[in-house]
Amino acid sequence: MRGKHTIRAPLAVVVATAVAFAGSITGTAAPATAAAGDVTITPVESNLAGKPWVSAAASSASAKAARAIDGDPGTAWLASRQRAGEWLTLHLGGRYDNVRKVEVVFPDKGAVYQYVIDASSDGTTWTTVVDRTGSWVPGRGGVHLFTRPGTAHLRVTITRASPGAKIGISELSAFNYLRDDLVLGADLSYADQNTARDGLTYHVDDPAQAVDLLSFAKNAGMEYVRLRVFNDPRDERSHEYLDPAYQGLERTAAVAKSVADKGMGLGIDLHYSDHWADPSKQAKPTAWTSLSFADLTAEVYDYTHDYVQALVDQGTTPDKVAVGNELINGFLWGSERPQPWFADPADWCFTCYFNNDPAFVAQPGGGLLWDYFGSSDATERAAYDAAWDRFTTLQAAGIKAVRDVSAANGLDIKLETHVIIDDGRLDRTLEFWSQFLTRLKAKGQDIDVIAHSYYPEWHGSAEDYERNLHAIAAAHPGYELEIAETSHPANDWDGIPVPNSPYPKTAQGQADAYQRVFQIANDLPDNRGIGALVWEPANWQEMVDWGNSSWPVLNVFGSVEVYRKSDAERVLQDTVYTATPVRRAPRLPATVDVLTTADGSIAPVAVTWDAVPSGATSAPGEIVVNGTTAYGPVTAVVDVVRRLGPPIIA
């Protein structure tokens, strides 16, 4: 996957119509219309301290160190030795390149705390990133900006405090931002289908303003396009071969050429079927139904080798190839998975062609037998193992084909295997990766990328999914991880909430849902998350508002802006902690710091503060003052106390 985010320049407007599509490319875009929906998108910011794999330790009372990362400022880690030099360390669970901001909150209002914050990659060698040993400003804490790639540990050491102030920390937060090499893209396979009427073009009344889907995608900030490939495309229900053969070998190769011409990254998703392959159906292509297992294995190699070589020959070398799609139940199902696959006439695919033709299960294939997972019966266990062996034999053939093409042409095409983590079935996916990787290596092959789909309807809440993804990453170090598919509706066409999702079916809800997925990929420790792809944003749970569009004018939801606006170009010191005596106006800083992510530089930026209401400091308590800067809002948290005192060694 390519990804330096070089195409994500600020976008002044939300593209709303096909006319605006063309205008945004030429620089004459019109303002967004109400049809697209008002959407507010800010850069993705993630507090790593709240992640389940992050922990805290301390110089004393370490058993209570977790109180400093529980998200509750009312609880605190308090050192058992109330003296200078006590410290608390945040262990991030791995290295991060884009932690840019740290916030520390101390227990006592109105006290002066002096401290240093050190960072480390290995927990042994430390670098000071924040030095407040000379600060005499009273306040409960501070927000600090820094740049240090490879940060895995942050340690706060309290060096001095006001007389009687508690030595401890109420909250310690470390904020992560999207990496430049995190690739954000989409599966745009329907570029071959819905836009085929004018040569892959969305058009307007004036043909001179026509703009194709892929140009729009690139202009919207998408960096990478995945394309699926069917062997000999046919309609699942009518059983008829498609004409044109949408998403077949030739047409997908033509779309790949368009992707490459636009300088976008290219992923190829081989389904090894004449239509959709997913967890519920993995039919062999019709032409392969009668092949013996040995011939089927040879066909997988030859087909994969020839197609990937053809892509290379036409100048469209894929960055990554997936040998199969959503393979949790195997692929190229054969005699090990008897019919009927859809036994209930109410099932949507009850009449699918592969469900009615016994030829599909006449020979062995690569189906997995999960019914025997964990069985103590010797016969069932033998069948389980045999199915795994056939599956990985077929997988190894496809993977070897890509490796051979890559080596013969001096290329580095990555291999991906793509499965799912069903809600409540992490055990099955952990078993999949354990069996798959072990057996694949025994056959002399391996992959580069572990990939999963994420649809909350089937895969659980974002929090559950994040925990599951981390569990898989922890179990299999050395592999990159990708969220290969995700989607969330942008319009409430049925009135039913999305299961396991707090995000409404609105353009704003869709943008928020996608940013949460981007965050999950980006927050995997050791920078192992390499990207997130939205599935069919122009055709499924889409960013195109087809319900309010009339061809040739297409309205686009403002959620498409997540591709451009999720990166932080600057990080602001957005919170100021200070204190003031009763009946005295607080002293608020004239400037705060802002960090430019492109070069790591930190500079002051002027703040305009709102007026403090009359009488706000007449009694002890807390007041909040809002401020504005050229780069966003700032908040001052002011503790009103009876008396301030100078710091001394505690």
Image: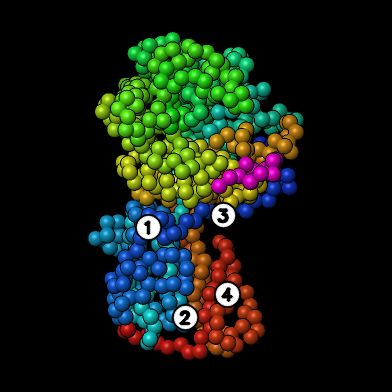
Question: What span is in magenta?
Answer: 489-500
Q: Give how far apart the Cα atoms at labels 2 and 3 are.
A: 31 Å
Which residue corresponds to mark 3?
Answer: 42
In the figure, 263 relative to 243: above or below?
Answer: below
Which residue corresponds to mark 4?
Answer: 624
Q: State which mark lies toward you, 2 or 4.
A: 2
| Kind of residue indicated by mark 2 | Lys
In x, y percent, where is residue 334?
A: 43, 18
Q: Is residue 330 left or right of residue 546?
A: left
- Sequence-wise first label, 2 or 3: 3
- Sequence-wise first label, 1 or 2: 1
Q: Is residue 613 left or right of residue 93?
A: right
In the image, 623 versus 555, the foreground residue is 623
Mark 2 touches mark 4? (CB < 8 Å): no
In x, y percent, where is residue 417?
A: 40, 32
Q: Secondary structure at mark 4?
A: strand
Q: State which mark lies toward you, 1 or 2.
A: 1
Q: Secondary structure at mark 3?
A: loop
In the image, 352 versus 413, the foreground residue is 352
Which residue corresponds to mark 1?
Answer: 54
Q: Is residue 370 visible?
A: yes
Q: State which mark lies toward you, 4 or 1.
A: 1
| Kind of residue indicated by mark 1 | Val
Which residue corresponds to mark 2?
Answer: 109
Q: Residue at x 24, y 60 (%)?
A: 124
Quadrant location of the N terminus in the rendered image? top left
Query: Main SS of the magenta segment?
Result: loop
